[in-house]
Image: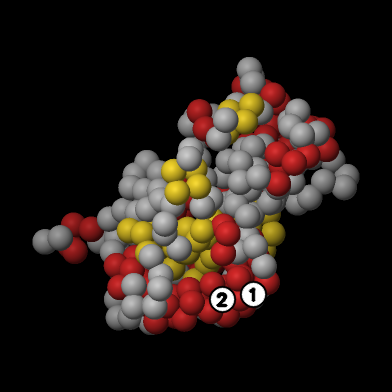
Amino acid sequence: MLALSASPSSAPAESLLGPGDPVPYEIHEPAAPAPVLLVCDHASRAFPRKLGRLGLPEEATWRHIAWDLGAAELTRALAHRLRAPAILAGYSRLVVDCNRRLDDPTCFAAVSDGQRVPGNEDLGDVERRARAAACHEPYHDAIERHLGRLRGGGIVPAVVAVHSFTPVYGAQARPWNVGILWDKDPRLPVPLLERLRREPGLVVGDNEPYSGRHPADYTIDRHAERPGLPHVCLEVRQDQLLTPAGIARWAEVLGRALADVLALPGVHEVWDAARATA
């Protein structure tokens, strides 16, 4: 991984973000009481002014290559319904992908779904470090601080990551309405799969259309899987999140299901994989 300062006020960050630029993360409902933290890695299509649009036309920045359409609105609606805080990344995934390790080639994608990203071609270490220090690490630091405060108070919080996916990718139609991504800890994903599959008309993917198996799902790995916190990653198909009514429907469906599984015995405990499989 790139070696860099985690401070949002470090010199590389100051050289990239200027007056009028968005903050690197948003904390929504910070004082909400539920022992749950919602995170949204691809909430924004914003770019630092100094980067322009990375050489992209305006219309490309509205595509899924730049952000997860509807994910931010769904995250805020779920936070309200669950009475839980949420932390949302403040910049486009094309600036730096907050759900990738910094040494992952797709963290600074030069091509995304067939679209060239000129501003990411031949990107040097200095530019990578500046983007990471300004946008990637402040977001992850905020998540760590919030989880640390909860754990310092004797709470084992759950982490729920919210994403959205395109209905068609590479000419392949995706039939799932929602996907549940996970790896080893079954406490949230397995009962959530069972709960959602009881909803009439829903096609629910188990590690579809993406896999939550390591090394995928960096944010969950870093903040939840390693320390043994209960966790799950949600993927909702984007065509269902294009209207306020669609957002409200999915906040209700997912909020109701999450509330049920978060209340199950043994959820708010540190996961011991060795003990669980003994």
In the picture, the disc for residue 70 is: none
Q: Name the residue: 61% across, 41% down.
A: 65
Residue 17: x and y in percent read 79, 40
Q: Name the residue: 44% across, 43% down.
A: 172
> Between residues 99 and 270, which one lies in front from this camera angle?
99
Tell me the SS state at disc 1. Answer: helix
Q: Name the residue: 37% across, 64% down.
A: 204
Q: Note whether residue 257 is visible.
A: yes
Q: Which residue is mark 2?
A: 249
* Cα gap from disc 2 to disc 1, whole angstroms: 6 Å
> Between residues 43 and 246, which one lies in front from this camera angle?
246
> Between residues 182 and 129, which one lies in front from this camera angle?
182
* Mark 2 burial class by Cα count in 10 Å: few <14, some 14-19, many 20+: some
Which amino acid does the dot numbered 2 rest on?
Answer: Arg
Residue 103: x and y in percent read 49, 30
Q: Which residue is mark 1?
A: 245
Residue 120: x and y in percent read 65, 26
Which amino acid does the dot numbered 1 rest on?
Answer: Ala
Q: Name the residue: 35% across, 54% down.
A: 207
The image's colouring method is secondary structure
Q: Answer yes or no: do the residues labelled 2 and 1 have beta carbons within 8 Å?
A: yes
Tell me the SS state at disc 2. Answer: helix
Task: Quarter of the image for the C terminus: give it.
Answer: bottom left
Against 180, is 216 above or below?
Answer: above
Q: Note whether residue 234 is visible.
A: no
* Mark 1 burial class by Cα count in 10 Å: few <14, some 14-19, many 20+: few
